[in-house]
Image: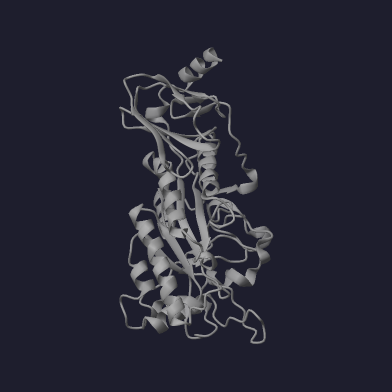
């Protein structure tokens, strides 16, 4: 086994200094729905939720992350009513959208039938108009969710769609985000960016002549009280490790979101859970493997990088294979065995500067300075079963982060 590892070390010699990273462009995303359990029309309820939103915003800012807060008519109208958003430049939605870390987008479930249990007379154009009324910059650029198999749900926005309630208002976004289905039974889960030619079978086909750009949300990654945040962290880490097994692709544009829903905003410790995720992913941010970007930043970044209108990228979630390998190889570092039992071996083509181990909650459980060595061992016998991140840095300024299973 040792000879094999040394051979691999020779093969990957120089990767730490020269390998091109295919980063994951990541954002926090949230949805507010018309059927949220909180009644935002009640001033005290709105005020309570506002404080929770501000806690999350503080967490996003403190970690230099990015958040797309996607809101429905009930929350926007509550902001207009309780904070006099028509004239108040410091209302919640206006204040958050003024921050570089956060952008506020419309999210809509339009139902124009008055006798329906889900009656909602506001469509996406109406929501964009309501957000304009809150003082947000005109126009809103992102459509926060849509039905990809239903042409009437999003195709009219290719040319600009008229409001249902505000019939004199027309809205044309740049971005359609996510690709849902009724009951989320057949969502189009994909990483990447392209211009869909149409609905259903035409949806995956890139047509550079179309107006709307679709930005994929990746595989479902939802913060909830039914799963530990370590699951959210592990999914992202697994994805990054998988990306690093792929050959470099200049068109690769891995886009993903970590989702939470306003119906869970009263979940105890939600802001702390989000902070834990951010902290655990920080080594990947430091190494350039994660780049926090809002949807608009992803859109602008893609078109700044790609002047060829025929360029696009799609990677379906059902094409992924995210399994731990016996040997982890990344940026000139070998870490083995993986999973580990008692002793983890690290080998590098460059001398280690620092070695830091994080548990699944982002806590540092081991850190030491390198002593010019290119081979070392970590005693893992006392580690609890679970996933860990081993972050290594080198004298040349490069970094490596790997997921290890104990």
Please, is residue 102 above or below residue 279 in the view?
below
Q: Residue furthest top?
A: 3
Give the mark count.
0
Where is residue 346, by image quadrant?
top left
Confirm whether residue 137 shows in the render.
Answer: no
Q: Name the quarter where the N terminus is drawn.
A: top right
In the depicted structure, whether residue 36 falls above or below residue 318: below
Foreground pick, 318 / 155: 318
Residue 185 percent location from the top left of the image: 69, 60
Instruction: Describe the colour scheme in one phrase.
Output: one colour
Q: Is residue 152 left or right of residue 246?
A: right
Residue occupying image coordinates x 54% and y 58%: 195
Q: Is residue 27 left or right of residue 370?
A: right
Q: Quadrant of the C terminus?
A: top right
- Find the residue positioned furthest to the front: 382
- Report if residue 7 is visible in the image: yes
What residue do we see at 41% from left, 75% from top? 47
Percent across and percent down for residue 322 are 60, 39
Residue 358 in the image: x percent, y percent? 43, 38
Residue 250 x, y percent position in the rendering: 47, 41
From the viewer's perspective, tell me whether residue 139 is left or right of residue 241.
Answer: left
Q: Within the image, what quadrant is residue 189 found in?
A: bottom right
Choose between 237 and 227: the one closer to the eye.
Answer: 227
In the picture shown, does residue 147 fall above or below 361? below
> Considering depth in this image, is 149 or 57 the residue closer to the camera?
57
């Amino acid at each position: 086994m040792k000879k094999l590892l040394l051979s691999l070390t020779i093969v990957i010699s120089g990767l730490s200094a020269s390998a091109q990273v295919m980063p994951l462009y990541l954002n926090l995303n949230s949805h507010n729905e018309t059927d949220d359990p909180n009644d935002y029309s009640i001033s005290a309820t709105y005020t309570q939720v506002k404080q929770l939103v501000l806690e999350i915003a503080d967490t996003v800012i403190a970690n230099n992350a990015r958040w797309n807060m996607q809101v429905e008519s009930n929350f926007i109208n509550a902001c207009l009513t309780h904070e006099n958003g028509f004239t108040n430049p410091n209302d919640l939605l206006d204040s958050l959208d003024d921050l570089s870390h956060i952008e506020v987008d419309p999210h809509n479930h339009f139902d124009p039938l008055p006798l329906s249990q889900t009656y909602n007379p506001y469509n996406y154009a109406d929501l964009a108009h309501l957000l304009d009324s809150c003082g947000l910059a005109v126009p809103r650029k992102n459509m926060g969710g849509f039905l990809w198999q239903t042409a009437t749900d999003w195709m009219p926005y290719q040319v600009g769609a008229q409001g249902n309630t505000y019939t004199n208002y027309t809205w044309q976004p740049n971005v359609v985000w996510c690709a849902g289905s009724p009951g989320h039974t057949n969502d189009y889960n994909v990483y990447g960016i392209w211009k869909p030619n149409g609905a259903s079978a035409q949806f995956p086909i890139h047509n550079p002549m179309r107006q709307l750009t679709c930005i994929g949300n990746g595989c479902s990654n939802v913060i909830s009280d039914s799963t530990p945040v370590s699951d959210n962290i592990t999914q992202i880490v697994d994805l990054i490790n998988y990306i690093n097994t792929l050959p470099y692709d200049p068109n690769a544009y891995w886009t993903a979101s970590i989702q939470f829903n306003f119906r869970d905003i009263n979940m105890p410790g939600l802001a702390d859970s989000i902070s834990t995720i951010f902290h655990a992913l920080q080594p990947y941010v430091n190494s350039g493997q994660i780049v926090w970007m809002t949807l608009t930043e992803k859109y602008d970044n893609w078109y700044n990088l790609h002047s060829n209108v025929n360029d696009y990228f799609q990677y379906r979630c059902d094409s992924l294979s995210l399994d731990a390998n016996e040997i982890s190889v990344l940026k000139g570092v070998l870490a083995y065995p993986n999973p580990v039992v008692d002793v983890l071996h690290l080998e590098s083509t460059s001398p280690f500067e620092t070695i830091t181990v994080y548990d699944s909650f982002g806590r540092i459980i081991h850190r030491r300075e390198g002593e010019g060595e290119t081979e070392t061992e970590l005693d893992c016998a006392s580690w609890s079963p679970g996933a860990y991140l081993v972050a290594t840095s080198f004298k040349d300024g490069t970094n490596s982060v790997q997921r290890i299973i104990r």
